[in-house]
Each structure stands twice: as C-alpha cells, then as structure tokens.
Amino acid sequence: MHILVINCGSSSVKAAILHPETRARVARLKAERLGTDRASVRIQHMDGARTEALGPVDAPEALRVLLPAFLEAATVKVVAVGHRVVHGGERFTTPIAITDEVVEALKGLTPLAPLHNPANLAGIRSARDLLPDVPHVAIFDTAFHSTLPRRARTYALPTALAEKHGARRYGFHGPSHAWSSRQAALHLGRDLRDLRVITCHLGNGASACAVEYGRSIETSMGMTPLEGLVMGTRSGSVDPGLLLRVMREEGWGPARMDQVLNRESGLLGLSGVGRDLRDIEERSANGNESCRLALQVFTHRLRKYIGAYAAVMGGVDAIVFTGGIGENSALVRHRTLQRLDFLGARLSESENRSAQVDLHHVVAPIHAQDSTVALLVVACDEEAELARGVRMVLREQAAVQAPRTIPIAVSARHIHLTQEAVDILFGAGHTLTPYKPLSQPGQFACEEKLTVVGPRRSIEGVRVLGPTRPACQIEVSRTDEFFLGIDAPVRDSGDVKHSAGCTLIGPVGRLALTEGVICARRHIHMRPEDAERFGVEDRDVVEVAVNSAGRDLVFGDVLVRVSLKYALEMHLDTDEANAAEIVRGHEGSLVETGATALLRCRKTVFDTA
Ligand code: AMP
C-alpha cells in the first residue's frame, strides 16, 4: 500500500511516494523556481537521482507533465493521494476526502491564503485528472491548531470588525508540529496526552507551538503565516503602529508593505546578506555586525516565545527543535536555550554539537543529565504526516457503517473526594454512604453533599460521587463557573493538574483546594466490542449528532474512552444537555435520558502508529 503525497506551491512542487507505516520512500520529486527561466526538477527513484532543467511551466503544469513518468518509474501501486493544503479555515479541522463539493469549499477559502490555497487547488486539479480512480485527501496546515482556545485565537480588535473580516488566529505548520510532538512522546516512552511540549519549527518559515496534553493551545503564527518568529524573509511580529507610520510616511500601499514584510525582512532584511542561516552564522563568526544582530534577534525572539508558552501551560516537559535550522544549527539551539535553566531546561553542549537526525534516526536528545525538561532535535517529516492523514481517511471509509446509536447520560455538577478529604469534611473515619448506583459499573451517587465556594459566590448541596479517588475533582458546568467566579479548564476526568481551585465546606470541616475544579470534557464510555463496531479506538475524538425532541445538535470534540470496565454511554454536562433540550433527571447523578446520539464521523485521532 503506497501513498502519493503532493505539496504544490506557487513556484515549487514537492511529491513523494511512500509506505504510510514504514515511511519508506520509493520515489521523490522536487521542482523549484517554477515560472522562471531557472526552473528545474530533481527526481529520485530507487535506482538513482537526476536533475533536469524545465521550460517555462507553472506549478500545476509541471505536475501534469512530470507526474505520469514519475509514477510509472516508481513501479508500485499508488492507492491514494494526499494533498497539503495550507488553509482549511474554520470548516476543515481534520483530513478530508476530496470531492467536487470540497473543492468548491476550498475555493471559498482563497481570501484567507491568497498565495497558497490557489496553488494547492491547482495541484489537486492536476492530480485528480491524472489519477481519477483513487481517493484524494486534503490535509490542512491549520487543522492541528483547530484546538486553540478562544483566548489564544482572538485578536483584541473591535468584535464587529474582527467578525466582518474573519480575523482570528489560525496557526500553520500543523503537520510539522503534530509530527514532532508525537515523535518526542514516542522517544520519551510517554503518552503525548501526559506531556506539555513546545515545538519549534525553524526553517525558512518558522513557528512555535505549545502542545498541551496532545492539543495545540498556542502557536506563533496567526491569521496569516507572517506573525510570530523571525523567519528567512518574513519579519514575524512587528508593532502594527510602526507599519501604519511607515505606510503613511513612505506613501506605500498594501502591496509594497506586503512585499517588505514577507520577502525583504527577517534574516534577509537584518543581515543584508541573504536568508540562508549557514551564511549568516559564518559571517557572524567573522565579525559581521549585521549578521551577529540577525542571530541575536532570531534567538531572543524564540526564547521569549518558549518562556511565554511554558507560562501558558504552567510548565513544560519537552522542547523540540525541527526544520532546516532546528535540525542543523547547534548554535541557534545553544543560544535559544541559554538562561532557560529556571524552567529546568539544561543543554548538554556535547550532545548539542554532535546531534544528527535524519528520516531513520528521527530524534536526538540534547539535554544534560540533570535537565528536568527533555530537549530534543526531531527530523521533520511532513510527508509521513500527510500519509498518516490519508490513512486515517481510508480507515474511516472502511469502518463498518453499522447503526451507531449511543445512550446519553447527563452529568450534573458533582464532586469526587479522596478518603483524606472525606475525613476532613465529614469527620475522621467517615465512609461515603451510597444513595443510588450510577450507570457506570461500581460508581454510585452518595447521600453526602457539600458547599462549593468560589471567589464570587457559593453553590450549596453539591452531591458527592463514590467511591473515593486518588485526587479530589469537582466537575462543574460553564454556567456554574460564571456563578462561582472560577475559570476552570475543559479536561478529561482525572486530569486535574494545574486546574482551578476552590473551597469545599462540609458538615465537619472545610478544605481549600489549589486545583481540582474542571469542566468535564464530553466523552463516550464504551466497551471494546462497541469500539470495533463503531470503527473507533480509545482516545479518538469524534463528532456526535444528538437527535433530541427539541433542538438537534452536533457535538464536536467528543472523547472516546474504551475499557472493559465501561458501559456504552455518552456523558454531557447540564449546559450541553440543555442546549440540545435533552431532559435531565435527578440532580447529582448520572441519568439515562432515553435520548440517543449518532456517531457521525471520526475526527482527530491520537493514535501512535
Ligand atoms: P527548511 O525551510 O526547513 O528547508 O530550512 C531552511 C533553513 O535551514 C535555511 O535557512 C538554511 O540555512 C537552514 N539550514 C540548513 N542546514 C543548516 C546548517 N547546517 N546550519 C545552519 N542552518 C542550516
């Protein structure tokens, strides 16, 4: 099973044929400077490589001309094609099979990425014409960042203006951040969902990303790929007031400003010698002041983002360097990581100098033995990530299309306690008294109730659920949060680290908690046989359509949890249930409502294959 992946840009085309599991490449093609008289293509097959000059063809035409012979010489059967698409807007947050309808929708996204999306679309058109009988899949640069919380994706502009222009932060380089964070977790032998990782993709384009427990929650590129870090020819973040002033005083229109910010700034603009970091490093070593400054600005900006992202996540477990500069420049890594030992990040100078990665040796650790933060160099493999997206869609298409209904239970606000907390709140040696069993085996609602005190107000009579657990956890709805004055994160049950605090008051004592209050992430409990029937795996994130009597609703970001201990059931909180007009039963317990949900489609998949 081999997959063709294509990245069709405005002046370049890259393609590769690879096996999605072994990642072994059968063939590669790279055409550059298309549309100029210096256009050339390099083609690599198992039996060798050749470089040829090309005529004056544009990128889609080059694909049309080169692809048939490229595929034929590869001598393997291509079962599907993956296309890199820069902008998926708000609609495309996961890889998707390309249909005529999808193509039309992508055309509508052109204003969001006027340079990139038309080129990507032209590549799709050429490849679909040449390979009409295999599935084509679009994989989006923006998709990995679709989990950015509202606070991170919102610009502080007047709301009406922002809405009119669709002004929000999207983030880019998704395949690279997804790939490198997953490789970091694999290398560390940890589950990505237990890690806070900062990934730094440093190439001609550069961006950093805070990957908190598997999800992108901050990234340095914004509405366009211009925001954030210093890049080869792009400025990264600049005071917007300065731009207004330059435009006013120079009499420049948007086109000139665009040219300066995107093509004449960054390492090129600062160094005055070019965008290639190798040249800049060499000249800097020879005393060139502009090149020294270029390196200082580049690494200072990056260090600033790393510090900020560690603050946003409340800590960091791994910092990852990838992309042409991240993988190759020991100097950039050294300078960036200076003064980060307050985070526990300590570089091993010798490991840093000798680090080498490639497609076979994907990860090189560069931290000192006493570093509490893993520092890793990861070989960027966006092709493998594109192939992975294709495989996901193929698997989804093959999943059994059986009836997929799921009973729904509504979870009112409730409290889980440790035995120590029970002792403090209800008296030493107190045992929780079962009031009634819950639908998940072994779980029960208790007679005991507590008052939850927030900074603003309190809620009395919040039911405790049993049995006791290793950590206290208070699950509230968003409405409860507003009432209490608490800002609780959306979390999986059991994941309370760095969540919000509150005070609990019981009949005997009171307990101040520094963490424990969460807004539970909606989820489905199921047994392995249900998972097989639905074509999902533990930790998949799916969409669920609720057909209620009043207001049908589709819930995204629903986590699948598979265990032999579970009974099939989707859990919503009261806000979610009210929004879909699902009737709620007894307060303080999980109640079967009789409403059913339909599992619609597989969304983000956190598999580690
Ligand atoms: P990319 O866009 O990922 O291909 O990265 C291109 C950037 O990587 C260019 O700025 C190159 O100068 C830089 N780069 C590649 N190799 C090295 C190296 N050995 N040392 C420093 N920078 C490098």
Image (spheres, grey):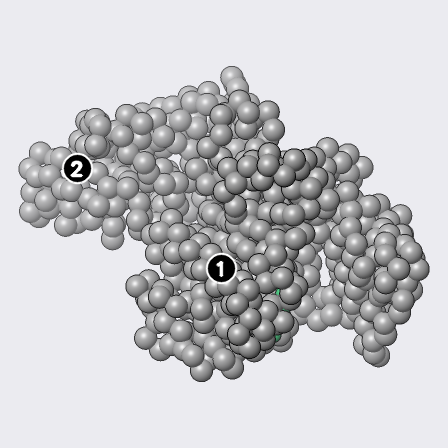
Query: Where is 589 relative to 40, above or below?
Result: above
- The residue that mark 2 highlights is 504
Q: Residue at x 72, y 66 (%)?
A: 19
Q: Quadrant of residue 255?
A: top right
Query: Where is 306 relative to 404, above or below?
Result: below
Task: Rate crowding at label 1 as few (under 14), some (14 to 19) or many (20 or more) other CA atoms within 10 Å.
Answer: some
Ligand 1 occupies quarter: bottom right
Query: Where is 21 relative to 422, above or below?
Result: below
Q: Nearer the viewer, mark 2 or mark 1?
A: 1
On-image quarter of the N terminus: bottom right
On the image, the x and y values in percent for residue 130 come to: 89, 52
Any part of residue 399 in sight: no
Q: Residue at x 56, y 67 (%)?
A: 291
On the image, the x and y values in percent for residue 588 come to: 28, 30
267 and 12: which one is in front? 267
209 and 562: which one is in front? 209
Give the tally of numbered discs: 2
The reply, left or right, for residue 240 in relation to residue 583 is right
SS for dot 2:
strand
Query: Where is 454 relative to 43, above or below?
Result: above
Q: Quadrant of residue 337?
A: bottom left
On the image, the x and y values in percent for residue 147 come to: 51, 43
Name of the residue lying farthest toward the top: 550
Between the residue at mark 2 and the residue at mark 1, the CA separation in whole angstroms equals 49 Å
Task: Rate crowding at label 2 as few (under 14), some (14 to 19) or many (20 or more) other CA atoms within 10 Å.
Answer: many
- Which amino acid is tagged 2? Leu
Any part of residue 410 in sight: yes
On-image quarter of the C terminus: bottom right
- The residue that mark 1 highlights is 297
- Which amino acid is tagged 1? Val
On the image, the x and y values in percent for residue 541 come to: 53, 45
587 and 515: which one is in front? 515
